[in-house]
């Protein structure tokens, strides 16, 4: 692959993708720290910040360390990471971990107590509570636990991903020092709620009852610790005989993947740390000292949190004005026949739109075939249950189920078996590529012949994430788009070649080239004295050819606005290079996941939605799709969405030329403007206008 310079990019214009990921945790932490926000929301943001930090260690750190060791980039022509970058990332991650703990210990815990939810430590409880908790321990916890001592006859135990453990330092009656590990069970709630409503962490209850686990021994100390393993496991997919077997092997291999982080209680003595480092085969810099409770992600599941109110300020998803015919497949399909329907989740309810579309297709006797491509699903899926019912009713049903969506492999494998057992044609994708498209095609027999209906989404067919992640869905009965997606399914499930599409743009075949052409057209427009514009809302921007095209566009005078949730590899505001590029991050009650692209303005405006971020992994190593929004109403709706996010002053951060993210503040005397709140209000008004008696 050509060097950076071939794309008009120098290293001075690049921002560490890894540090950029970590900055998302920092922004979420800022929202958790904001005392003006409702307490339930602050607690949720703290848990999300901890979850994002977990994800960084699982998905990125091992690859980063390997880049440093080998001096070879995992994403050429991006330069390989350096030892200094690795050290900076580790320092930043440790500082964020400790900042989250301080926020919990010094602020949120007290605020929760004032609101009626007391999260106590064992030491702060009285004798009566200790007695109740001892009885609880003996009845509900003690029979589950397995104390594991370490000595020549008992090897060091296996530690699973993100498992919380207690390191026990003890000695026998002769004073011989011993080490033991007790795993905090994952099939019990992390939090124990006393009759008084007070909550205490399960590991503290177990630590206080060690005498029951080691009778006759002297307990010198009990110290929580938690390990994080990489999920970036080396594999030889090209030699896989069956992708389902391969995914199962991958899951097994991940059990023993390298440990990239060990969180430990700061009070853990040096000899115990040294023993852990030796047994886990990790370096000392893998340890992160913690002063408060580990696994703050579990704060999202505190019992009794209902006293704080709903963590989401925005109202529940609204029905869509055009797709409100629940239980009437004919009315739903008629609405789509009348014109493309654009749906914005979760402002507009997923169950009443996407899930209703699949249920309607499954129950409608006029439907002859259903095909679906999905990337992530959940353990419970009413859409997949509907497909099983459709197959039982004699419809032709085919599902392309990606088995290698990281951290969801187990659920996908289980569904693959169920779907196959139901007689559904199941494919697992392509060797060497992840299938990242989210599509449903429905073939329906109507008086004038067979008609194809399609759903294209930027998000997953997943009820859980659909309630908290923003995404866009398009429903259409346009023949050209239906033909394209039908051809795509034939390519994905058959042995044909992907042909020339009318509207669909596919990766890895042509998406990057199409995006570069669209950016180049804006560059040419600006050079000719016109208004060149590029606006995109994505999760990540790190593909070097696209970064180079954006730099060239900026130099020509194109206004480039990017709304990026997670990673961004380009520094804006560099004179003579990126001074026409503005990059921001917007967070809120919902996490931004939609991919919406706008090129040009006025009569030249073109709007697309896509499954792909602007990263090389998406454009080179995944099956991705992008489609134009051709109807004026849909284009106007998405254009307004982009403009609202660019105007946000309630939960927006701007990326600066030095790589820092600064909070966007409203102008003096003006109230903060929330794009998410504005969108929620607009969609609610749209429903009211359609209802009887509405304005």
Image (spheres, rainbow, N blue to C red):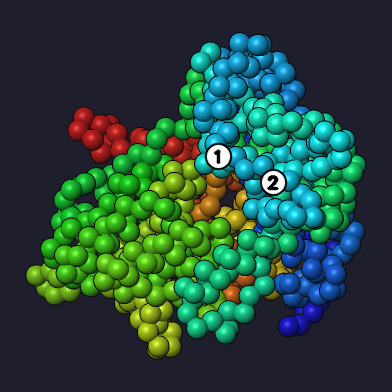
Residue reaching furthest to the front: 174
Q: Nearer the viewer, residue 63 or 294?
A: 294
Q: Which mark is residue 135?
A: none
- Locate residue 457: give its quadrant: bottom left
Tell me where residue 347 appears, x and y as whole percent: 41, 42
Asked whether disc 2 touches disc 1, contact meaning CB atoms under 8 Å apart, the reply is: no
Can you name the residue that lies furthest to the bottom here?
A: 496
SS for callout 1: helix
Give x and y (percent) for residue 4.
79, 75
Which mark, by number, is residue 148?
Answer: 2
Closer to us: 233 or 206: 206
Tell whether 632 sits left or right of 335.
right
Q: Residue 525 appears at what percent x and percent y? A: 61, 69
Badge 1 density bin: few <14, some 14–19, many ≥20, Cα 10 Å:
some
6 or 40, nearer to the observer: 40
Single out the residue that lies furthest toward the left.
447
Residue designated by label 1: 144
Determine whether the residue tagged by mark 2 lies in a helix, strand or loop: strand
Which residue is located at x 32 percent, y 59 percent? 384
Q: Residue at x 11, y 73 (%)?
A: 448
């Amino acid at each position: 692959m050509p060097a950076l310079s071939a794309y008009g990019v120098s290293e001075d214009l690049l921002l560490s993708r890894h540090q950029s990921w970590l900055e998302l945790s920092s922004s979420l932490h800022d929202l958790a720290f904001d005392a003006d926000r409702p307490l339930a929301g602050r607690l949720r943001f703290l848990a999300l910040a901890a979850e994002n930090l977990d994800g960084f260690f699982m998905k990125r750190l091992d690859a980063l360390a390997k880049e440093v060791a080998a001096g070879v980039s995992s994403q050429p022509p991006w330069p390989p990471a350096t030892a200094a970058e690795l050290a900076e990332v580790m320092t930043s991650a440790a500082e964020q971990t400790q900042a989250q703990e301080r926020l919990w210990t010094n602020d949120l815990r007290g605020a929760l107590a004032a609101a009626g939810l007391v999260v106590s430590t064992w030491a702060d409880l009285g004798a009566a509570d200790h007695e109740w908790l001892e009885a609880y321990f003996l009845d509900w916890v003690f029979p589950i636990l397995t104390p594991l001592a370490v000595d020549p006859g008992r090897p060091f135990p296996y530690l699973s991903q993100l498992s919380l453990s207690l390191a026990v330092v003890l000695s026998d009656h002769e004073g011989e020092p011993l080490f033991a590990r007790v795993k905090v069970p994952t099939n019990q709630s992390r939090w124990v709620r006393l009759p008084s409503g007070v909550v205490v962490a399960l590991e503290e209850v177990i630590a206080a009852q060690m005498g029951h686990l080691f009778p006759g021994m002297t307990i010198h100390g009990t110290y929580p610790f938690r390990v994080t393993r990489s999920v970036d496991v080396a594999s030889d997919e090209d030699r896989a005989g069956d992708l389902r077997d391969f995914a199962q092997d991958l899951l097994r291999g991940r059990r023993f993947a390298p440990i990239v982080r060990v969180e430990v209680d700061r009070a853990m003595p040096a000899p115990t740390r040294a023993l852990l480092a030796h047994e886990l085969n990790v370096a000392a810099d893998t340890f992160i000292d913690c002063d408060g409770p580990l696994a703050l992600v579990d704060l999202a599941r505190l019992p009794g949190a209902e006293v704080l109110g709903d963590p989401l300020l925005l109202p529940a998803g609204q029905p869509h004005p055009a797709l409100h015919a629940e239980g009437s497949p004919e009315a739903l399909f008629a609405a789509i026949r009348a014109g493309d329907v654009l749906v914005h989740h979760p402002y507009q309810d997923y169950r009443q739109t996407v899930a209703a579309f699949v249920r309607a297709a499954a129950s409608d006797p006029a439907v002859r075939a259903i095909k679906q491509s999905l990337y992530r699903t959940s353990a419970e899926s009413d859409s997949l249950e509907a497909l099983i019912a459709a197959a039982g009713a004699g419809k032709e049903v085919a599902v392309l189920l990606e088995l290698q969506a990281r951290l969801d492999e187990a659920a996908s494998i289980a569904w693959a078996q169920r779907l196959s057992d139901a007689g559904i044609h199941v494919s697992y994708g392509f060797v060497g590529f992840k299938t990242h498209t989210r599509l449903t095609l429905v073939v329906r027999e109507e008086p004038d012949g067979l008609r194809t209906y399609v759903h294209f989404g930027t998000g997953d067919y997943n009820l859980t994430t659909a309630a908290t992640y923003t995404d866009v869905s398009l429903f259409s009965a346009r023949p050209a788009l239906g033909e394209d997606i039908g051809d795509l399914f034939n390519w994905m499930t058959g042995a044909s070649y992907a042909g020339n599409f009318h509207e669909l743009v596919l990766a890895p075949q042509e998406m990057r080239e199409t995006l570069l052409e669209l950016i180049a057209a804006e560059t040419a427009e600006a050079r000719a004295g016109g208004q060149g514009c590029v606006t995109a809302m994505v999760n990540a921007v790190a593909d070097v050819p696209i970064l180079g095209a954006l730099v060239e566009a900026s130099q020509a005078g194109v206004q480039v606005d990017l709304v990026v949730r997670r990673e961004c590899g380009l520094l804006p505001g560099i004179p003579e290079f990126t001074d026409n590029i503005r990059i921001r991050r917007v967070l809120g009650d919902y996490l931004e996941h939609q991919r919406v692209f706008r090129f040009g303005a006025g009569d030249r405006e073109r709007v697309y939605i896509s499954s792909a971020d602007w990263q090389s992994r998406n454009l080179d190593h995944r099956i991705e799709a992008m489609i134009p929004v051709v109807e004026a109403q849909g284009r106007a709706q998405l254009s307004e969405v982009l403009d609202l996010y660019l105007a946000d002053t309630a939960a927006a951060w701007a990326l600066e030329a030095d790589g820092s993210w600064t909070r966007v503040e409203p102008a003096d005397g003006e109230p903060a403007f929330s794009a998410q709140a504005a969108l929620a209000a607009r969609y609610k008004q749209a429903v009211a206008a359609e209802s009887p008696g509405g304005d």
